[in-house]
Image (spheres, rainbow, N blue to C red):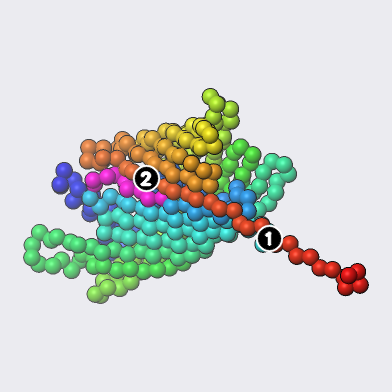
Amino acid sequence: MQIKNVVLILFFSLSLTGLIAQQDKLITNFMYDKMSINPGKTGIDMDNSICATSIYRNQWDKVNGAPNSAVLNIEGNFSRLFKGGLGLAFYHDAIGFSRQNNLLLNYSYPIQIGNVGVLGLGLGIGIINYGIEPNWVPPTSTTDPSLPTGFAATNLDANFGAYFQGKDFYAGLSSTHLSESLLEKSVAGLDQNYQTARHYYLMGGKTFDDVLNGKIDAQVLMRTDLVKLSFDLNARYFYTLNDQVLYGGLSYRNSDAIAVLFGYSPIERFTVGYSYDITINKLSSVSRGSHEILFKYCFNLPEPKMTYSRNPRWL
């Protein structure tokens, strides 16, 4: 097992002089993270409120160098101030020796499509930071000059998306890393760089009401960098008891995992959720699965104060 772990560290670190972007983060609870990959979603399905969502993912537990991801999304519908939604999307990825941080400001412009729903066209602009901090263990005491040393670089990042919200369904198409920015730096005479790759996402979901005294929420997310395609399918059952909502469900990611999902909303504005991925690929012999926990809280924006004026002639 130790040999496999060392190999995985070297694989995940991607520590070569020229780096090509890996697949974007994988989140089992992607239904709570739609804004970060599709800015068209920003505030579209909200009514004069602000929501904050935090997700932490520990992937392939007990595998050295395996991915760990943290997500923080804050979005709101500000239709009373201006037309559209605003949001801030941040995520951190740590894989082996590498660290990646993304921070984007999203805006979505809503277009009402008759009585069918709302189409949101969104743009996200921000930065991407990538760095590596390798800790090489050479087989001899002689240092290998070809091994890259630590470096970090920052550049522009941009996303675009279209998101349609209907009464009981949604659909979205988006692309991340539109600029395909090159992050590069020369360290100790060795040029090191990291090339971001454009990713494409297709998402959709539908809610089925009045099913066994509850409702079923089914969703799909497809992602590709035009090299590899992966997709998630899930279905969750929601049950309401004394204004408290509980849900449970199953999710499947091709060639990777089967997951169970649980969640609880003690009040309408707050949700806590957990998922556990059962690894089904070649890492199943060394991985103890993946854990994910999320928190979401929403609050309504205050009602605008009404002001009145009187004509002094009428006093």
The answer to whether residue 33 is seen in the rendering is: no
Q: Residue at x 54, y 40 (%)?
A: 204
- The amino acid marked with disc number 1 is Pro
Disc 1 target residue: 304
Question: SS at mark 2?
Answer: strand
User: Outermost residue toward the front?
Assistant: 315
- 31 displayed left or right of 23: right
Work out whether 135 lies above or below 9. Answer: below
Disc 2 target residue: 292
Q: Which mark is residue 260?
A: none
User: Outermost residue toward the right?
Assistant: 313
Residues marked 1 and 2 touching at CB (< 8 Å): no
The part of the image, by quadrant, that contains residue 20 is: bottom left
How far apart are the two marked residues, 1 and 2, measured between alpha carbons?
A: 38 Å
**Where does the image place residue 86, in percent across and percent down from the top left?**
57, 59
- The amino acid marked with disc number 2 is Glu
- What residue span does the magenta drawing correspond to? 55-63
Queried whether the magenta region covers residue 56, the answer comes back as yes
Q: Residue at x 37, y 36 (%)?
A: 259
- 292 displayed left or right of 237: left
